[in-house]
Every structure is written in structure tokens, then in C-alpha cells.
Image (cartoon, rainbow, N blue to C red):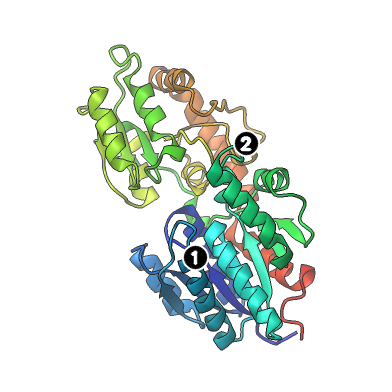
Amino acid sequence: MSSTLRILHCLRAPVGGLFRHVHDLTLGQAQLGAEVGIICDSNTAGDGVALGRLADNCALGVTRIPMNRRIGLGDWRTTAKVSRLASKLGVHVLHGHGAKGGAYARLAGRKLKRQGTNVKAIYTPHCGSLHYSPAKPMGRLYITAERMLLPSTDGIIFESVFAANKYVELIGQPHCPARIVLNGLYRHEFYEPMLADDAVDFVYIGELRHLKGVDVLLEALAAHQTIFPGRALIVGSGSDERSFKRLARKLGLNSRVSFAGPQPARTAFARARCVVVPSRGESLPYIVLEAAAAQMPMITTNVGGIPEIVAGIDMPLIPPGDVGALASQLRAFLASPKPFLERAALLQKRVAERFSVENMTHEVIDFYISDIGAGLS
């Protein structure tokens, strides 16, 4: 094995939980002595501070190129750029994250192998393409693409049991090594919350898109509002932001719901008494881990890997899209927050035992070396 492992992480948009995962993994790998680089979309502004931190710690640099969200002919040009960069840097591992990053990494890896380069193409789905229904045209397109990319995949890392099972269900059993490596948090993220004097009742933090269920939260807030008039803060931005604001106005929530734009989760936690995660689909969401670490009372749906996070805690999870069930939990918190606070304290301890950046980083490096032989000449 080469004395220094050279890794290039490929992802599309440097935002959200996927980017947080890549950011933390990259810094951890660099601290372990690997030479690491990032290639991602230049059309998405992203988190400037986090990108700057990566640039300071990535021996192989942070490269920004245009990457389209939708599948198109431009993807071939992007793949060629990823391939040229990986060849120039002499990387041992091309690690693709999400549907687009995973496709670019594996297609580029296939091209490099044909040229005689010993590079390993790794894929972490983050459940992007796995959220699409196979009954719909776009879902069939993504599933077909995933199946076609299987032969070009040297290894798959899933961030949850849910993601691994969903992949097998939709795509098929991987013929390459695969491992489940849980997302992790830093030790400093575990603390007791301090509420602002003007804290509202509920906060949503994340992308403003249909999949995340913000519309369900708004409708639940509007239900029986004359009995329990809870106030909420919506933190984030996204493609459906305008439609959610229109819905809030339509439901008469203008005086009770504020849209705050993106801000750090820790800042948002201080501005509300309870975190609400109304998602229709997730993998292993960082916002649930971060809220648990901050000992925040939480109301969340029963989707993706969330049951894995709260395993061992007697915590009710809501069916996705169920306005009535969510409204019932919102009212329960307003009427008696004590059970929610008690569960938050128990969940904080549980998450601290199982989810750490150190474990995540070491397991991924071990997978590269032990399972797929990265760096072997």
C-alpha cells in the first residue's frame, strides 16, 4: 500500500446533510494523514465558511465545476472533468456521494481503469435516488441508471440500515463489498440548550421542499389553532419556499409562523422549545442527530433511519404526511412538555454512545483499505 492514501470526494451541491457528512469525513481523513480533495458544483453557493475550512485542510484542494441537478448531456462533460482531475491528482479512491456525485465518481473511475489506473470507485447513496418511486418515470430512470452503474462500483457505504435495505429492494444486492457506517457528531455538539427570551414553540430546520413535509407542518399548525395557538419558526431555503409561504398565508398563519432563511442549527435550537421533523423521506438525518445532541424535545415522522436513531427510547413517531397525527403531537407538547423533555435527555445519552465522527472516519478508512484494497499497487 502507498504510504499516503489519496482520496477525492465527489458530490453535487455543497449544502445540507450530505455536505455535512462529506465535510466531517474529509477533515477526519486529513487528520489521519490521508491526502484528500473535493470536487463539487460551482453553481451552488454553499456554506462559504465550511468550504474555506476544507480548502485549508485538503491537500488535493477543493475544485468547483458546473454540475446539473437533472440528468442531461452535460453530465458526460462533467464526468470527463472528474476523470481528468482524479488522474492528475493520482488518487487511489474516488468516493461519490448522492446520486449525481456517485454517478460521476463511478463513470470517471471506469474510464480511468480502462486507461490502466488502479483507482477504486466508492458510492454512498445518501438515499437521493432511492426516494423516487419506481412507479413513476423519473423513478424508473434513476433506478435504471443505478443498476447500470453497479458493475462500475468497487464498494458501497450506507449511512443507515434503512438505506442498505432500500438499495437492495430497488436496485438489487450489491456484488461488491458493502458496509453500514453511521453518520457521526463531534463531542462539542452535546450540550444543554439555552433558550432565547423570545423563543417560539416549534422550529423546522432544513430544506424547503415537498419531500421534507413543511406543508404538513403548516397544516398541522392550522388545525385547532383556536385551542392551541402554537408559534413556529421555519429555518432554511429551497425550491418550494414560495409555495410554503403562500400556504402559510392561505391558512391564516402569518402572525404565528415566521420564515427565517438559512442559519446554523445551534442558533435555531435556541429560538424554539421543540424541533419538528415532518419529513416524508429521509436516510439518517443530521438534524435529528443534532437536535438529540442538543437535548431538544423533538417531534418527528417514522421515516428512513430515524427509528434507528431513537431505538431504545419510548418515543412516538408519526406516519409521514399525517396532518392529524402531527397536530395531535403539537398539541400534546403545548399541553404538557415534560414527557418530551424527559425523552430528550435519554435520547441525548443514547446518541452520544453510538454516533461519533471519530468512529465514522475510522470505519470508512478501514473499508477503503480492508474491504476494497485501496492504495494497493
Amino acid under disc 1:
His
Q: Residue at x 33, y 64 (%)?
A: 45
Whether 327 is drawn above or below 193: the answer is: above
Whether residue 158 is visible here, answered yes or no, is no
The disc label shown at residue 23, or none: 1
Indicate whether 113 appears above or below 329: below
Quadrant location, the N terminus: bottom right
> Which residue sits at x=48%, y=61%?
72
* Mark 2 or 1, nearer chain start: 1
Q: Amino acid at mark 2?
A: Pro
Out of 308 and 86, give the one closest to the viewer: 86
Secondary structure type for disc 2: helix
Q: Quadrant of residue 146?
A: bottom right
**Residue 123, horizontal then vertical, whole percent:** 64, 62
**Disc 1 element:** helix
Relative depth, front residue between 282 and 290: 282
10 Å crowding of disc 1: few (<14), some (14-19), many (20+): some
In the depicted structure, whether residue 249 falls above or below residue 139? above
* Residue 201 visible here: yes
Counting labels gives 2
Query: Residue 119: x percent and y percent?
Result: 68, 79
The C terminus lies in quadrant: bottom right
Image spot of residue 77 (x, y percent): 48, 74
Of the numbered discs in the image, which one, if any, rests on residue 307? 2
Marks 2 and 1 sit apart, C-alpha to C-alpha, by 25 Å
Residue 42 vs 85, above or below: the answer is: above
Q: Quadrant of residue 374?
A: bottom right
At x 55%, y 43%, the residue is 137
Q: Position of residue 373 (x, y in %)?
A: 77, 75
